[in-house]
Image: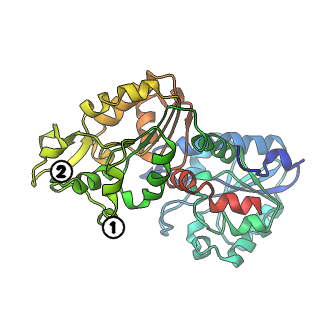
């Protein structure tokens, strides 16, 4: 582990202390009910550890973009089935009074952090308010730690600050990609290739093979001179792709699926009226040798248009990976949701709760949240 991070082991006796616990509880909610509780259940062991230690736990988190109607109340309601919890307004005189009267082992959750503009602005006054509620701070929200927001960055400089177990585990496992066992296969899916160029540049140097799929591959088809029809293209990321195509480590799927009729065809034969929506199973099967001989596989982002139900290529890749002996690290919200729907999440070596934070950490080797804890 290349980082020296203060962790819960360094926090000493927390009995009777008010602990500000930053969690990632940004989960999908429909009709007032939590639809995917993976991030919540992942965070529960940390909460229970603090409760058992006699700490007074103050949970802070965000939801969505911070619209007035985006409330964490459904999350608090879900958690009440697991532990006694009091849901409080974010910034209210009664909130502070209630927290001051908490007993050892009590748990409260504050309303959506993004209801305050000070959160995303990393505002010092807002950070001071949060810090005034507690005597120690724990960041167990690795998935949001690529953002220099008040609850991630500024507040960590105002209180004794520690990495939580989830945070620590993310850093430990993802760091394996920096000095990997070989052969090492890196799989990059999803969309918006412009945000992933630093990652691609880094890992074509580290990995033995890099597979680019999902909408991210469409830019490479266009760079090859192929027709991409109505497929999603990241217009800001065409420059320089030809150089990557010369690298023998880079693998772009030769067979794809188009939306029109869900037909499989060669990527070089897409018509102007068609839309690329998935990697064909033939392209996944062509990866079999690389998958089965790898000692480390890191995968972020689905290989198809997940939101529209094009998951065939990704599911075929999951089946191949499960037949390998490699260490397997997977991340990205849609990728994790896919594994969960297949009931195979626990069959991977490590499943990251992070999407963008995973990509930023792998690309840059650090995050604002890590740097705040190190300070």
Residue 283 in percent (x, y) is at 27, 34
Residues at circles 1 and 2 in contact by the CB criterion of under 8 Å:
no
- Residue 161: quadrant of the picture: bottom right
Q: Secondary structure at mark 1?
A: helix
Camera-side residue: 227 or 9? Answer: 227
User: How would you rate the neighbour count of disc 2 (Cα within 10 Å): few for under 14, some for 14-19, many for 20 or more?
Assistant: some
Look at the image and tell me whether residue 324 can be seen: yes
At x 62% / y 52%, what residue is drawn? 142
Q: Which residue is label 2 attached to?
A: 275
Look at the image and tell me whether residue 95 can be seen: no
At x 61% / y 67%, what residue is drawn? 148
Look at the picture and state if 90 lies above or below 104: below
Residue 180 in percent (x, y) is at 58, 37
At x 13% / y 50%, what residue is drawn? 274
Residue 60 in percent (x, y) is at 66, 59
Of circles 1 and 2, the one toward us is 1
The numbered mark at residue 236 is 1
Q: Is residue 234 left or right of residue 28?
A: left
Q: Is residue 95 left or right of residue 203?
A: right
| Label located before the other in sequence (1 or 2) | 1
Look at the picture and state if 308 lies above or below 17: above
The N terminus: image quadrant: top right
Look at the picture and state if 231 lies above or below 368: above
């Amino acid at each position: 582990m290349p980082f020296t991070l203060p962790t819960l082991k360094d926090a000493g006796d927390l009995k009777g202390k008010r602990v500000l616990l930053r969690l990632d509880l940004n989960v999908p909610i429909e009709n007032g009910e939590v639809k995917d509780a993976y991030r919540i259940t992942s965070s529960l062991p940390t909460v229970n550890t603090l409760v058992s230690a006699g700490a007074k736990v103050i949970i802070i988190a965000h939801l969505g973009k911070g619209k007035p109607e985006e409330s964490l109340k459904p999350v608090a309601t879900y958690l009440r089935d697991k532990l006694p919890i009091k849901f409080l307004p974010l910034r209210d005189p009664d909130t502070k009074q209630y927290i001051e009267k908490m007993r050892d082992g009590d748990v409260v959750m504050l309303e959506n952090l993004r209801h305050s503009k000070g959160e995303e602005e990393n505002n010092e006054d807002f950070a001071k308010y949060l810090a005034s509620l507690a005597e120690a701070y724990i960041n167990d929200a690795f998935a949001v730690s690529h953002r220099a927001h008040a609850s991630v960055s500024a507040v960590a400089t105002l209180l004794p600050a520690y990495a939580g177990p989830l945070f620590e585990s993310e850093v430990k496992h993802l760091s394996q990609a920096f000095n990997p066992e070989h052969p090492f296969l890196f799989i990059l899916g999803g969309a918006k290739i412009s945000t992933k160029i630093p990652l691609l540049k880094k890992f074509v140097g580290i990995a033995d093979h890099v597979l680019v799929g999902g909408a991210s591959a469409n830019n490479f088809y266009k760079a090859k001179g192929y027709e991409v029809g109505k497929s999603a293209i990241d217009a800001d990321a065409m420059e320089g792709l030809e150089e990557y195509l010369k690298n023998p480590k880079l693998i772009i799927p030769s067979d794809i699926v188009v939306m029109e009729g869900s037909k499989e065809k060669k990527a070089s034969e897409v018509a102007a009226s068609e839309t690329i929506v998935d990697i064909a199973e033939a392209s996944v099967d062509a990866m079999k040798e690389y998958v089965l001989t790898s000692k480390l596989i890191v995968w972020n982002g689905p290989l198809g248009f997940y939101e529209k139900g094009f998951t065939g290529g990704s599911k075929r890749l999951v089946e191949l990976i499960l037949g390998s002996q490699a260490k397997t690290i997977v991340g990205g919200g849609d990728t994790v949701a896919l594994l969960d729907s297949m009931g195979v999440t626990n069959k991977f070596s490590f499943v990251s709760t992070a999407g963008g934070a995973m990509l930023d950490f792998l690309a840059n080797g650090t995050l604002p949240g890590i740097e705040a804890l190190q300070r």
